Amino acid sequence: MATIASHGNFSAEKTAFSVIVAASFCHMLNDIMQSLLTSLYPLLKANYALDFVQIGLLTFAFQVTASLLQPAVGVITDKWPMPFSLPVAMLSTCMGLLTLAYASHFEVLVIGACLIGVGSAIFHPEASRVARLASGGRHGLAQSLFQVGGNTGTAIGPLLAAFIVIPRGQSSLSWFTVIALTGFVVLSWVSVWYTRHRKAQAGRKPASRTLPLPRNQVMMTLVVLVVLTATKNAYLASLSSYFTFFSIAKFGVSVQQAQMMLFLFLGASAAGVFLGGPIGDRYGARTVIWFSILGVIPFALLLPYANLFWTSVLVVVIGFIFSSAFSAIVVFAQELVPGRVGMIAGMFFGFAFGFGGIGAAVLGVFADREGIEFVYRVCSYLPLLGLLTVLLPRLPERT
């Protein structure tokens, strides 16, 4: 049977690109601020004499805070929409940055990381919902445009850290509150659009919540998608959290050079996300998931044994291929459980953060005991769990 997205049967409703771009822009701002935390790990490690376990715990605090709250936010806002929760999310992230900028000890750093996590938990499910509402039926494109903003922000963050915060000191984090206030203003406009859209749609029949497959098969498929998300993000956490340390330890590069290599990976990830959604609209989300999850395996296995040049090449290839799956996974899950946009977005963005955080904390323990290169050899086998993709069913075409 044909997949839902395979023929591009889009809604007659016009795609509101200005709203999607605004949501994507704020996703960029949000993730710039989030990525500053992981980008500053070498500086924080030196300033507070942290070990790798504490570094992992910082990532754990940020990502698990977001993970625990995001599905709850999604479920609540599916029932009781809260358009103006979006600008509130930016204020929480702003407070987290200020806390990190002037932290006196490790415990305060953890509080700052949690405040950023709370902002992320509120932002992602609702902003993803707005992107879908504005999509005019082009769900893959909208999700990709929204997600690429986040990946772009994550890529820019290390550069800002390398050239502003590291040379000028930890307190310069407070300068980035200007970014949070900009996001607050833009998201206030988005929230007004969201409110008007809800009023305009008030008289329409609610979207059907009929499952496209038997309930047991839907549950099994969701489990497979969660495992794929967990695997992907645990592996990506090993790159985003520890790749600078790996590059410095293995190749003897400077902190700034290591940040530039991290930028290569994160920039390629942004490109992969951008292309994954439109391709999914054309050929189906399941096809993109297959290509992304399985296609990365040989490159991941080679990475720990490559020299400096080939490491730079491989992280670009891995970032591009692996990151193309996330938008497709979210769209596939939203089609699998119709009418639960917030819950699905919150669950998968939450798992993305949560498993990344758990992975980072566990990998920190191994990095302290066995060395950072050992961690990368072990992580190279994680993408093999992507073979579970074979269990994903084809979704019936909606009429």
Image (cartoon, rainbow, N blue to C red):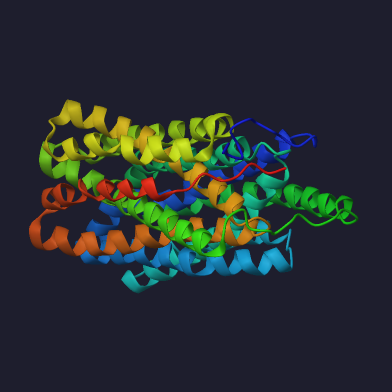
Question: Which residue sits at x=18%, y=45%?
Answer: 246
Image quadrant assignment for residue 18:
top right
Q: Kindly give the residue lying farthest to the bottom in the view shown.
A: 107
Between 120 and 278, the residue placed more toward the observer is: 278
How many numbered circles are shown?
0
Q: Quadrant of the C terminus?
A: top right
Q: Kindly give the residue lying farthest to the left in the view shown.
A: 370
Above-or-below relation of 32 to 306 = below
Q: Kindly give the residue lying farthest to the front in the view shown.
A: 1
Locate residue 319, reporting x and y percent.
35, 36
Residue 138 lies left or right of residue 35; in this view the side is right
Above-or-below relation of 298 to 119 = above
Residue 251 visible (yes or no): yes
Question: Which residue sits at x=41%, y=56%?
Answer: 224
Locate residue 194, reporting x and y percent.
77, 51
Residue 375 lies left or right of residue 22; in this view the side is left
Residue 233 lies left or right of residue 270; in this view the side is left
Question: Which residue sits at x=80%, y=37%?
Answer: 13
Locate residue 121, reporting x and y percent.
54, 62
Between 148 and 108, the residue placed more toward the observer is: 148
Residue 101 visible (yes or no): no
Locate residue 24, reporting x and y percent.
60, 41
